[in-house]
Image (cartoon, rainbow, N blue to C red):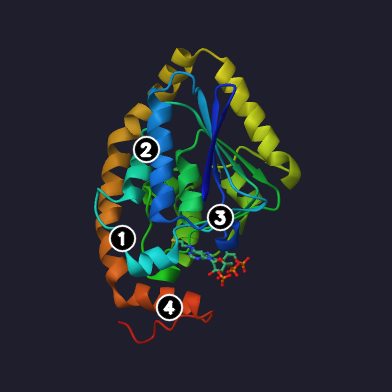
Amino acid sequence: MDILVERAEGVMTIAFNRPDKKNAITAAMYQTMVDALNEAQTDTSVRAIVFRGSPGIFCAGNDLEDFMKSPPIGEESSVIQFLRAISGAEKPLVASVAGAAVGIGTTLLLHCDLVYAADSASFSLPFTQLGLCPEAASSLLLPRVGGYQAAAEKLMLGEAFDAKEAQRMGFVNRLLPAAEVDAFALAQAAKLAALPASSLRVTKSLMKRAAHHEIHTQISDEAVHFGKMLLAPEAREAFKAFFEKRKPDFRQFD
Ligand code: COA
């Protein structure tokens, strides 16, 4: 199973489990997560949700082979449904990042309530390097959380940055030794699970309410551009280059 879904003491854990491909997410994996998140939404025994990776890697983003062979386009795609599920989740979302978080591996964190990372974790948003544009409302949320120039550096250059910087930007709560992050995140989720669910639900919705509509719209607007760019020659060149283990050559494009 490329996604492991476990439930224990009020906490649902969704774990990326495709380490041979650095936990890159396929359409089937998004669908498994959507189903789990939808279940969590209505199952009163689930009181908090934790995302985690596998040892040494959080998530290498969307599967680039999927991007090449069956580009996800439109509101019905499992990736957009996943984004709707995390941006609309009423229950607390906690993330444990013990390794690289690339693309949606980083942007999903902007929808989590608590984010814990290994001090050795790294983050990157290589959309422009792939001929793409931001997704998951990151073009709205990252400037908001980290300030415009910090966000522009990450979203325009697309270079990896370290955990200290992610914490400084404001979307990581706390840094821990790699071996301790999963247990700490789970313990924080267990604390949430022990609190009154109604109180957490109202607290989260009050914090999220004002931005809900613009996040929804931004996800749609980004997806229109993203869908077109996935089919454009720049992105095709970038994906091909990745699998041929070479640098892409964008000089041929205007
Ligand atoms: N989609 C599909 N396959 C991926 C992948 C992705 N996003 N990320 C990694 N893989 C595969 C590699 O092709 C490789 O497969 P192989 O063993 O069959 O050759 C395997 O996972 C290991 O990846 P590798 O690049 O050798 O690992 P690394 O430790 O040197 O680097 C990353 C790890 C995550 C930094 C690097 O794999 C990477 O940059 N991946 C692409 C990230 C990306 O662009 N994501 C999309 C963002 S929108």
For the residues labelled 4 and 2, the Cα–Cα distance comes to 31 Å
User: x, y percentage for residue 152?
Assistant: 45, 58
For the residues labelled 2 and 3, the Cα–Cα distance comes to 21 Å
Identify residue for label 4: 240
CA neighbours of label 1 inside 10 A, class few (<14), some (14 to 19), many (20+)? many
Residue drawn at x 61%, y 23% as measured from the top left: 190
Q: Looking at the picture, does residue 219 appear above or below residue 252?
A: above
- Closer to the eye: label 2 or 1: 2
For the residues labelled 2 and 1, the Cα–Cα distance comes to 19 Å
Q: Secondary structure at mark 4?
A: helix
Q: Secondary structure at mark 3?
A: loop
Identify residue for label 3: 18
Is residue 33 toward the left or the right of residue 232 in the image? right
Residue drawn at x 28%, y 70% as measured from the top left: 231
The answer to whether residue 212 is seen in the rendering is yes
Of pointers 2 and 1, the one earlier in the residue sequence? 2
Identify residue for label 2: 85
Identify residue for label 1: 226
Of pointers 1 and 3, the one earlier in the residue sequence? 3
